[in-house]
Structures are given as C-alpha cells and as structure tokens.
Amino acid sequence: MRILLVEDDELVVEALVKNLTDQNYAIDVAADGQAGWELVDAFTYDLILLDVNLPKLDGITLCRRLRSQGLRIPILLLTAQNSSSDKVMGLDAGADDYVTKPFDGNELFARIRALLRRGSSTLPPILEWRNLCLDPSACEVTYNSQPIHLTPKEYGLLELFLRYRNRVFSRDAILEHLWSFEELPGEETVTAHIKGLRRKLKVAGLSEDPIETVYGIGYRLKPVEPQKPRSKSKVTKKPKQLSPDLEQQAIETAINVWQRVQEKFTNRVAVIEQATTAMLKNDLDESLRQQAQQEAHKLAGSLGMFDFDEGSHLAQEMEQLFEAEMPLTPKQRERLAELVAAMRQELERAVNQQNPQLLKIEH
C-alpha cells in the first residue's frame, strides 16, 4: 500500500516514515500543502496522512481541493490537540477520520488499516485466499497456520491482490502502489518480485498459484469457490515476542534517533525563549511571534511522539499564548515565562533520561 504523508515537522516525519515502512507501506513525503497537491496529481495513493497546519497550502484547503476534483482517496487528518474547530472543518471538507497530536502510534496505525479496508470495499481484518491468510495488523502471512516469511515488497504484492481481489493490476499500476516516487524501478522488478512471491508460496505448500497472469494486461488474484463455514472454535494466539537481539537493536535505534533530534528540540525552545524575552521587553515583532507559535506547535507533536507528555502539554499552552491577542496581559506574560522555564527543565530531564520510545508502539 502506498501512503502520502503531508507534514512539515521533520521529527514527526522521521518517526512516522520509519514505523510505516516497518509495516510494509511505501511512503512519499510532502513538506507543504502545495507539494502534497502536486504529488497527488502525479501519482496514485491508497491513503493520505494530512497535517492541518501546513505552509503554502493548509491541510483543510488541500482536503477541499482534492474532494472538489472528485478524488475519493481516504484522508486521515493529523490535528492539534483540543482543536475541535480543525476536526469539524476537516470532516466537513471531506476528511474520513482524524487523530490528535500527540497521537498514540497503535491507534494511528489501526485507523490507517480501517480506512484502507473501507477504501477497498468492506474487507475483514484478516485477508484470506483459501488457507492462505494475511494479517495486516501484525504484518504476518500464514498458510495452514504456518508462517511464511516474505520480503516487504512480496508482502505488499500479496496484500494488494488480496485487498483488490477483482482488479487486474498492470506492472505500472503495481509500481505506483508499492514503490515511492524516489525509488521507482523498472517493470522487470515487478516481474522478479512476483516470481519470488510465487516461489515462496509454493515452498510453503500451496498446490495452486493464487496469482493469475492476465497476459498482455497484468496480474490479479485467482478467483476461488466459496469455502464452507469454519468451526467456531478459536485458537488462542500467542503475543508476538521480539528476540533479545532484535529488542536490543530496536532500543539502540530509538536511542540513536533521540540523540539526533535533541539539537532540534533545543533549537525550537531557543526560538520560544527569544520570543518570550522580546515580549517581556515589549519588543516582539509579528514575524518572531509566528515563528515561536510554529515551533511550539511542532514541539507539542514531536515531544508527545517521543512519550514526553508533560513537555507536549507545556508546548500546547505556549502555542495558545502566542496565538492570543497581543499584547498579552501581565498575568499571561508571567505564565509564558513560567512555561519556558518548565520546558527547559523538562527538556533537561528528557535528555538525562536517555530512554525514549520512537512511538508508543507495542512490539
């Protein structure tokens, strides 16, 4: 499945791209609404993750423009917490769902899966072809309850055919669905991955190839006769556990990401401090006020994604104060200064903690 992420906060982008890629999605990124519009015009997407607060063309306007062109791509809005007006406007503009920042990773990915099911007609959570099963929530493929280990692209191919079981996909269409525009290979790559997928399914025990070649056109899922209803007895599924080596690798990856973003957090707080100092001296210009507001907005989302909820709440309150009518009252100025000092302490605590989570995601 191919997703377009329209988001201008590089820290949120980095975290989302990593985790969505790990779940076998192909991701394109646009840093502003205009770039997002141009990508949608040029490529085919299965879903759009759309931030509301964007430069050049805001998310609400982009959503309206997409719907006015008759595009029915599922759109999931990323909105600021407590911004009910954004949610209402977004849904009225044609968005299908929304999550608020800072968001829980598991909830976001569950909503993505739900929208993808809705976008490909009403499909069950588990995609099946006879005894071949694909579980999108766990990114697992089994045949007769035995796991089949596929590469990300082989998994993407199988999911594509299972989701759109009545559609014939040309090689070009497969490339558009499963590869980002930055890595588009030639059509022969599709042929090689199809061959690899078929080989692994055969080794797993499938006596019949589930992928049908429509000569001169492309590929599709082979139709099957309806199966008899399964027994209602359920098998308890054991929770998926990471091996010690993979768990340690995940921890080291998260720490490395955190070390790279510390400087960005510090720079954002520095801009807010500069604006606060200027405000206390009655010397705050409009440009610096807007920049501080934007940095506070980004901090609220990115700190929350790294599981520093207190810092996220502080940033949200600072954003609200920078959005308030100027000049601020003496009480509001005093509160802003308190928030900046608290944010500095929270950032120092976060740095000393050195135990971040890239997203609130259960392994």
Image (cartoon, rainbow, N blue to C red):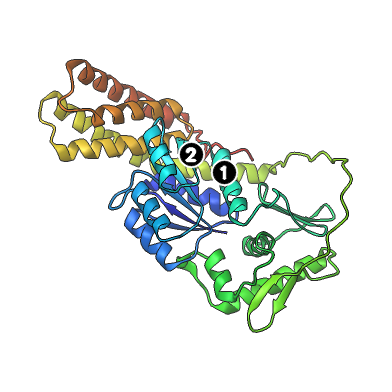
* SS for dot 2: strand
Callout 1, which amino acid? Arg
Looking at the picture, does residue 349 appear above or below residue 29? above
Task: Give the residue pinned by disc 2.
Answer: 99
Residue occupying the point 68% across, 47% down? 138
Callout 2, which amino acid? Val
Looking at the image, tell me whether mark 1 or mark 2 is earlier in sequence order.
2
Question: How far, Cα to Cα, is label 1 from label 2?
Answer: 9 Å
Is disc 1 in contact with disc 2, using a CB cutoff of under 8 Å? yes
Mark 2 Cα shell of 10 Å, populated few (<14), some (14-19), many (≥20): some
Total numbered labels: 2
Left or right: residue 354 versus residue 1 is: left
Task: Give the residue pinned by disc 1.
Answer: 111
Q: Quick check: can you spot residue 8?
A: no
164 or 29, which is in the foreground? Answer: 164
Q: Position of residue 246 (x, y in %)?
A: 64, 46
Q: Position of residue 42 (x, y in %)?
A: 42, 68
Residue occupying the point 82% across, 38% down? 236
Residue 363: mark in rendering: none
Residue occupying the point 68% across, 83% down? 215
Looking at the picture, does residue 355 appear above or below residue 156? above
Q: Point out the image quarter for the N terminus.
A: bottom right
